[in-house]
Image: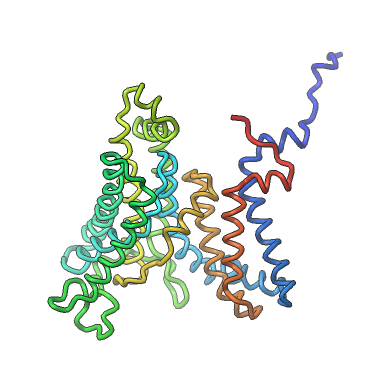
Amino acid sequence: MPHAEEIRQPASLGALWGRYGAYLVPILAVFTALVIGALLIGLTGGDWEAAYIGLWEGSFGTWNGLSNTIIRATPFIICGLAVGLGFQGGLFNIGAQGQLYLGAIFTIVVATSLQLPAIIHVPLALLAGVVGGALWGGLAGFLKARTGAHEVITTIMLNYVAVRLTEWLIKSKTPYLLGDPADTTGARTRFIADTARLPGFFVGDTTRLHLGILIGLGLAVGVWWLLYKTTIGFELRTAGTNPAAARYAGISVPRTIVLTMALSGGLAGIAGAGEVLGVRNALSADLLTGLGFDAIAVALLARSNPIGIIASGILWGGLTTGASLMQVRAGLSIDVIKVVQALIIMFVAADQIIRFVYRIPQQKK
């Protein structure tokens, strides 16, 4: 007969909460935000059930909705990786929007001015996006490493510079720089060459999936491998967690800062390249406006985990895409979804709220 102390007791609910709390908090944050959203819809006289059915069908419940969600989620995933990589390195990169624009500018130059076989043209245009974004992100990193200028301030300001630079390049007519002389509105560049377009799959009357989502998934795996399986990733995380310990270990913190911001910017640049090559086939000054701040939410929701960012990016894409059908079905303002998204961000950023409501113990440090 085994001794009583040898009999394994089932884990208590509190122990399970403590063990899996880090994974439960984002899920419960989304659930709680949706519940509050339903209450707000009901209190204002709306039909929350019809609204959420429309949200589901417009995002995941139909093939057309799912394909549009995947397309919309692709830049969220890639820019979320950019922001998450910065977080892992202890850097708050708010400049994903500007880095995306610079990547798109470099991409459009290559995609409109060269005539090459598609097997060369597409990778070269994508590489141009990486270079543009990396230069813009690396500039913010250099300013922090060399002068101590905080990356939050510099990246915000560089966002404005990037947007205004894009507008000037598109709208300039004496001479024409990137603008299309055939476009009387002056709102876009010339269309890219056919050989520079990202290959599509499952293309139909209502679907237009392109290679960008596969690139995003591959980048998520690549960033995870970089962070947790390479020396560079170890140095990046160490410098972000404890710069003093990193210096003591012989790691060059200034070099790591510049490298982290350059890598982060390069990822955002790929997002810009993918949007130009796979969706719009041209560049306009309203390219994915506000994406930089959405990317922060995506990274926060996933706790900067590269694999988790795939899920949070798809969720964010679904909320954004499904909002239109929700508006039609329930006659609601699309701003309801923005309220839900804002609540999700708040609950994830201030996770003490969710932990208090659901009695989830704080993680031991």
Res 227 quadrant in image: top left
Colouring scheme applied when the structure was drawn = rainbow
Q: Above or below — where is 85 with respect to 241? A: below
Q: Above or below — where is 52 with respect to 246? A: below
Residue 230: x percent and y percent? Answer: 37, 32
Res 212 quadrant in image: bottom left
Give me the residue at 33% from left, 62% from top: 160
Furthest-bottom residue in view?
184
Left or right of residue 256: residue 79: right
Left or right of residue 246: residue 340: right
Give me the residue at 74% from left, 72% from top: 43
Viewer-nearest residue: 309 or 212? 309
Residue 326: x percent and y percent? Answer: 61, 74
Residue 365: x percent and y percent? Answer: 59, 29
Q: Quadrant of the N terminus?
A: top right
Left or right of residue 74: residue 347: right
Give me the residue at 24% from left, 59% from top: 125
